[in-house]
């Protein structure tokens, strides 16, 4: 039943996808249900639509799947590339590739693994531009963001672009793990003021975490406790007259449970966070699991649209924006507490 539904899903966007559609075979289904194989899915899909001479090959994919094999695959690729890193190509957003990736890779993951669902969809506006502001957690690959972007695209046909930490664009681990400029091509916008403001000026629909990196950094002990909100999204909403759509995610804390941030090692390897949990022993044996997360249920509750503006207090600048940001945080925290009491 899953295979039949997925075949229909994979064929549904044939006219819009670039080139011939990527069709799952038995190896892809195996990778989907075997955690070290998720990185293979991402790279194989990229190589179907893009020429990537520096990418992983079949021998290296096979090594991903055995304990410690990723290190041999890394050595093999490094030798094959002539003792250098993969080339950092200039990448631009490709809406058609985002659509193909969404339908052919994200769809089965979201539907059958994270079981993503939207609630209170009557609060969705008919169109953008928008800032979709959501609590962000999980201490892992940003699956709460990717799942919401997929669900909004399916529900409204929106092209959603997430604001992403610069690490996802340029960290050496990401450069070796994922295809060149993968985040940019899929629509990621760097979490830097100039890039954020430029995307808003173009009237895009942006997915934003007001907590910033403080959200996933808080760890398991403070799960579902919202950290201080940044004020930049309030100020930019006011400047460009773009409304904010608040969203509460329930389930994201379980993407990587029981984790705490290992601060000293995190700073040493220059990552935004480095979770320490029982799952890290598996990650040491299978580093390709870095894009994987625990199976959970991600539910998104859409709040009423918040119009742009600072309630006629724009002249107060940052102070008024800070107050409005924290009022929104308190409102979402109350909603989170209410939702948790029901489940």
Image: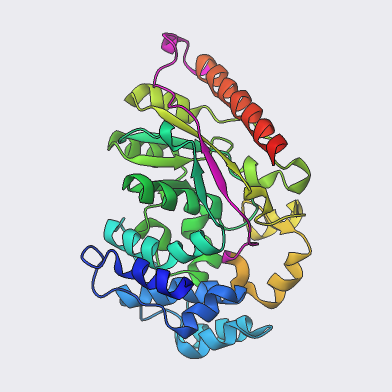
Q: Main secondary structure of the magenta part?
A: loop
Instruction: Return the residue found at the far front.
Output: 1
Q: Quadrant of residue 206?
A: top left
Tell me: 157 left or right of 163: left
Quadrant placement of the C terminus: top right
**How are the colours assigned in the image?**
rainbow
At x 71% / y 56%, what residue is drawn? 275
Q: Quadrant of residue 34?
A: bottom right
Q: Quadrant of residue 3?
A: bottom left
Q: Position of residue 190 (x, y in %)?
A: 43, 47
Residue 296 versus residue 335 in the image, above or below: below
Residue 142 appears in the figure: no
Residue 320 versus residue 69 in the image, above or below: above
Residue 126 appears in the figure: yes
Tell me: 308 left or right of 277: left
Tell me: 225 left or right of 165: right
What stretch of residues is rendered in magenta? 291-318
């Amino acid at each position: 039943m899953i295979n039949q539904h997925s075949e229909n899903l994979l064929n549904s966007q044939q006219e819009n996808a670039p080139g011939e559609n990527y069709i799952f075979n038995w190896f892809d289904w195996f990778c989907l249900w075997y955690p070290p194989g998720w990185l293979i899915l991402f790279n194989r899909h990229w190589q179907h639509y893009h020429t990537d001479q520096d990418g992983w090959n079949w021998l290296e994919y096979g090594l991903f799947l055995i304990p410690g094999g990723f290190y041999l695959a890394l050595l093999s690729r490094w030798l094959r590339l002539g003792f250098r890193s993969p080339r950092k190509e200039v990448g631009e957003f490709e809406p058609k590739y985002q659509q193909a990736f969404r339908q052919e890779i994200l769809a089965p993951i979201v539907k059958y693994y994270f079981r993503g669902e939207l609630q209170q969809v009557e609060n969705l506006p008919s169109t953008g531009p928008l800032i979709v502001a959501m609590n962000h957690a999980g201490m892992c690959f940003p699956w709460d963001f990717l799942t919401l972007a997929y669900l909004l695209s399916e529900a409204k046909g929106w092209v959603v672009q997430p604001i992403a930490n610069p690490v996802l664009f340029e960290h050496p681990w990401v450069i070796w793990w994922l295809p060149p400029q993968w985040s940019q091509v899929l629509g990621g916008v760097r979490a830097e003021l100039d890039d954020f403001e430029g995307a808003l000026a173009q009237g895009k629909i942006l997915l934003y975490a007001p907590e910033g990196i403080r959200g996933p950094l808080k760890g398991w002990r403070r799960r579902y406790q919202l950290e201080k909100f940044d004020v930049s999204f309030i100020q930019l909403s006011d400047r460009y007259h773009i409304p904010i759509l608040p969203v509460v995610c329930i389930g994201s804390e379980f993407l990587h449970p029981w984790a705490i941030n290992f601060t000293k090692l995190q700073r040493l390897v220059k990552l935004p966070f480095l979770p320490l949990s029982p799952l890290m022993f598996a990650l040491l044996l299978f580093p390709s699991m870095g894009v994987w997360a625990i199976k959970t249920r991600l539910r998104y509750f859409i709040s009423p649209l918040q119009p742009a503006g600072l309630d006629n207090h724009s002249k107060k600048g940052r102070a008024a924006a800070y107050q409005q940001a924290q009022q929104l945080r308190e409102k979402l925290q109350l909603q989170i507490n209410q939702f948790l009491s029901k489940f």
